[in-house]
Image (spheres, helix red, strand yellow):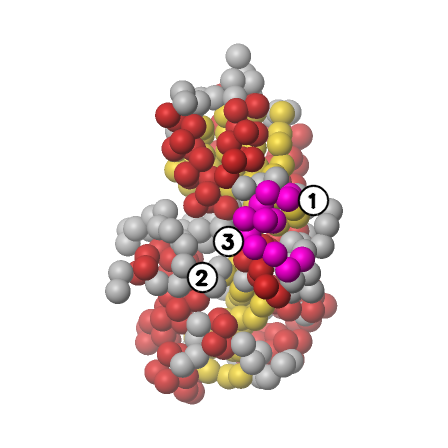
Amino acid sequence: MPLHDQEMRFVYGATLNELMVANPSVLCLEADLSKASGTNPQVPAAHPENFVNFGVAEANMVAAAAGLATEGKIPFCATFTCFASRRVYDQITISVAYANNNVKIVGTSPGVTAGPNGGTHMCFQDLAIMRAMPNMHVYSPCDVYELRAMMRHMAGNKQPTYMQLIRGQVGAVFDESATFSPGRAMRLREGGDVTLVSTGYMTHFALGVAKSLAAEGVGVDLLHYPSVKPFDAATLVESARRTGGVVAVENQSIIGGLGGAVCEVLAEHCPTRVRRLGVPDRFGEVASEEYLFNKHGFGPAQIAAACRELAGGAR
């Protein structure tokens, strides 16, 4: 089966197996959600000695990962995004970030993709709280090819890292040649009318919008940010100076995440009109993605409308 036809969680598990073959120090740590993460049964079947299930004990998993990292291991710790960020924030702060330990934390089902699990499991704050943490890199891949390239980078570089992981299948944006460099934005389409900035899950939708607007004569400069921290300020500033208007869209709260990074950079280096699209200051609810996109105004139709509104701001 082609890679882009597979669910991202299964590519996550398969890539861990590849990394373990190349480096036995790579470990898979789980907190009783290994099937949801896509690692069970494929990782324990292939590398049982590299797989540890801590049960429903996320804080213990992260603390143990920090200890393993001090001994030269490379632990990947996966659990639902709400648990990977909010529930274990203190353990991550002290044992991982403050100690600068080489732990890879993976938050699955970010934002509206948590769907049926509702408000308690629908975390809209993880990019914001992780981005504010010293020493922490914060990543969000948009498809399976970028996910694989990102994981290879993570395994080969000593750095506390938080990565979002969509569990389901997502349309391909890149291909087998995909690469990843932290702090580098990817220009997916060139245009001079409006800058559209996205990350992770929303990039697939943003690309579709950019293509449809091109048919209307609106040139979208589409910047995909797989790395929310470190953040590629130079590419954003260059684009904003040309277009005069920026739309930021993310599967997150509009407070503190990608939109926050965009506004911080532009306020200091290139004051520009900005529209932040995402979830307002709200908790989640049991609902479909389409319902939440429409309710909170960050689906494809709303992205297109915001781009049209700001198009041509530099003229």
Amino acid tagged 3:
Ser
The magenta stretch is 285-296
Q: On the rendered structure, is 226 left or right of 267? A: left
Between marks 2 and 1, how big is the CA–CA gap? 24 Å
Could you tell me which quadrant the N terminus lies in?
Answer: bottom left
Q: On the rendered structure, is 146 left or right of 175? A: right
Task: Determine which residue is flagged by label 3.
Answer: 140
Q: Which of 15 and 170 is in front in this view?
A: 170
Q: Quadrant of residue 66?
A: bottom right
Q: Where is residue 155 in the image (x, y as percent from the top left)?
A: 43, 66
Say if 312 sits above or below 101 in the image.
Answer: above
Say which element carries label 1: loop
Q: Do the residues labelled 2 and 1 touch (CB within 8 Å)?
A: no
Residue 155 visible in the displayed image? no
Q: Nearer the viewer, residue 231 or 6?
A: 6
Residue 294 visible in the displayed image? yes
Amino acid tagged 2:
Gly
Task: Determine which residue is flagged by label 2.
Answer: 168
Task: Determine which residue is flagged by label 1.
Answer: 280
Amino acid tagged 1:
Pro
